[in-house]
Image (spheres, rainbow, N blue to C red):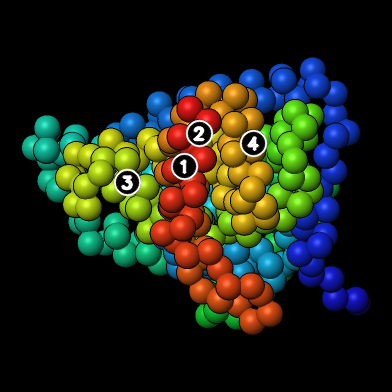
Amino acid sequence: MDRPVRPSLASLSDFQFGAVTTETIEDALLHLAQQNEQAVRDAAGRPGSFRETRIVEFVFLLSEQWCLEKSVSYQAVEILERFMVKQAENICRQATIQLRDKTEPQNWRALKEQLFNKFILRLVSCVQLASKLSFHYKIIGNVTVLNFLQALGYLHTKEELLESELDVLKSLNFQINLPTPLAYVEMLLEVLGYNGCLVPATQLHATCLTLLDLVYLLHEPVYENLLRASIENSTPSQLQGEKFISVKEDFMLLAVAIIAASAFIQNHECWSQVVGHLHSITGIALESIAEFSYAILTHSVGANTPGQQKPVPPHLVARTLRAAASSNS
């Protein structure tokens, strides 16, 4: 049997723009905006985030090994994130009830070990579920999953694999078709194309995919830089950090920053025009776009790659972004 061909970077960026009517785009953009507002509201008070670098890297590498498209890897990370948040919330809820009722405390060490022992299985189940949402592309079967787990030293049966999927589904009330930042990026690129953006949408799309990977892999450092920039303080308080959790779930803001950073990399002379369009489309402040895109760029232009031009120094990036934002305001 022929081995499946891994999707190349070219095929990943082969996204068709301009094939949808403006009415459909307007409806879809409005729907995404409403979803985003709800997600930001729901994020208030959440017990942290589980988008750690090692976890995200594991999901990305596994998705690549199984020849899954990029949207599946993002979807898998978001499913796992929601599932782990639910697990943390359930633990906190149980502890609160036990304290209130003064019942015998649960063995938290045993519970922690149980979660730890099943984590890889749950992670792989999230990837498998995400692949089923994109059934038009490729579904990962149980045999493939079991063989992979066995290679890592985890012996599970098909029944345990199905129970793991069901556990994830029940925890999320079977609502796993979650929006990802990629959906917002591609929708905004579609709108930019209709608005006469100087940088071609297909050209921006490829860079956006790379930067979105970067933000997922360096989630905490990028958002920590953004938090410090937003409060103009290098040592945020715990309360400021807790309030900032909702910003981490603002996919519209992330998508805008990803596109702005991509435009700066592709053609910084057109950056002001692109940011102006993004501001008009989303209503997000120019200063917010500049701050977030700067946070992304400082993590992406700091090292030379053989055969490439010398990157723009971060201080020049900051000065250029702020000057452009001021000229647009």
- Identify the image quadrant of residue 214: bottom right
Under circle 4, the secondary element is: helix
Give the spatial CA distance, label 1 vs label 2: 6 Å
Q: Residue 327 carries which label?
A: 2
- Identify the image quadrant of residue 109: bottom left
**Identity, as a three-letter code, of the amino acid under mark 3:** Ala
**Identity, as a three-letter code, of the amino acid under mark 2:** Ser
Q: Residue at x 53, y 23 (%)?
A: 283
Q: Residue at x 83, y 39 (%)?
A: 17
Q: Upstream in the sequence, badge 3 or badge 4? A: 3
Give the spatial CA distance, label 2 vs label 4: 11 Å
Please indicate, yes or no, whether residue 242 appears anywhere in the rendered image: no
**Residue ID for mark 1:** 323
Q: Do the residues labelled 1 and 2 touch (CB within 8 Å)?
A: yes
Please tell me how crowded label 4 is: few (under 14), some (14-19), or many (20+) other residues with Cα within 10 Å.
some
Disc 2 versus disc 3: nearer the observer? 2
Could you tell me residue 205's position as x and y percent? 72, 50
Q: Upstream in the sequence, badge 2 or badge 4? A: 4
Q: Would residue 109 appear left or right of 12 to someone viewing this image? A: left
